[in-house]
Amino acid sequence: MYYNENTVIFLDGKFIKENETSNSLYSQTLHYGYGAFEGIRSYETINGCRLFKPDEHYQRLKKSCELVGIPFNYSVDQLTTLTYELLEMNGLTNAYIRPLVFCDPNMSLTKPNNVSLMICAWEWGAYLGDKQLRLSLSSFCRPHPRSMKIEAKICGHYINSILATTEAKEKGFDEALLLDSDGFLAEGPGANLFFEKNGKLFTPQTGNILPGITRSTVLELAREKGIDVEIGHFTLTDLTNADHAFYCGTAAEIVGIESLDEFVFPTSWENSLAKQLSAMYSALVYEKIPLETSKC
């Protein structure tokens, strides 16, 4: 699904066939989840192929590493150039890109001296599909912000997400919704939450959630359209009194939520702010002015 015998990846300074790579089984990332990653999309726009917000994604990758003490010295410009080269080598335009910073062999619980960088890419549709989601409230909560750097996109954090999604799917739902450690609305396992009521948008504040780049884009689009947005602490009751809700993220893009357990949102996707914002988002990612590096 993600690669074949012709797939090229970037690994530690060179482009190489995926099936010709090897890595130590003593990597600190493999044993302890101590690594950082990003998810980026490229789109075949009317102006050519381009990455969507590469500066923001790669700045966040560098910040994630900094927050948890992982040394990482690539510049944003270097990373962006390498990504366009990788897409061109693999003949990809509409693609999902996964940069991963992983640590050298180290069995101790100390920060690494050296790391590796891998960048790979593959064709991937919207992660959560294009139908309205049936959510289940998870029995798991998001980690307490004093337990780790919540704003860092770190490999080990996603064990929490895997547990929540697996639980929801085993119960027959499409995806989970997680609360934070204080019982307030947080986010999905891999996407941020918005809900709407009487023409106004609401979204949980940062501090207990990953501050998503798509979330920031939705906030920008809402301001452009003149939609009021309230950011704060919200309860499950706030959500079940809402007209509609949606998830957003790089992998998921913007996807509507049909229900949460037995509660069904009364406003349809067709009549929601979510649909309007989704159309604006699509126009943004496919029709933006071309970048100088827009070639893949």
Image (cartoon, rainbow, N blue to C red):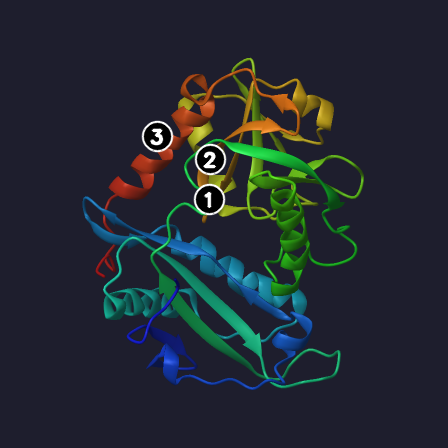
Q: Is residue 205 visible?
A: no
Splitting the image into 4 quarters, where does residue 102 fall?
Answer: bottom right
Identified at 40% across, 60% down, the residue is 97
Q: Position of residue 9 (x, y in %)?
A: 36, 74
What is the three-letter code of the residue carrying label 1? Ala
Q: Quick one: label 1, few (<14), some, or many (20+) residues within 10 Å?
A: some
User: Residues at badges 1 and 2 in contact (C-beta under 8 Å)?
Assistant: yes
Q: Residue at x 79, y 44 (%)?
A: 181
Q: Which mark is residue 255?
A: 2
Q: Is residue 207 above or below residue 5?
A: above
Quadrant including the C terminus: bottom left
Secondary structure under the numbered disc 3 in the rendered image:
helix
CB atoms at circles 3 and 1 under 8 Å apart?
no
Identity, as a three-letter code, of the amino acid under mark 3: Ala
Asked whether 99 or 188 is in front, the reply is 188
| Mark 2 residue type | Val
Q: Is residue 173 above or below residue 212?
A: above
How far apart marks 3 and 2 lie (CA) works out to 11 Å
Relative to residue 211, is residue 38 drawn left or right?
left
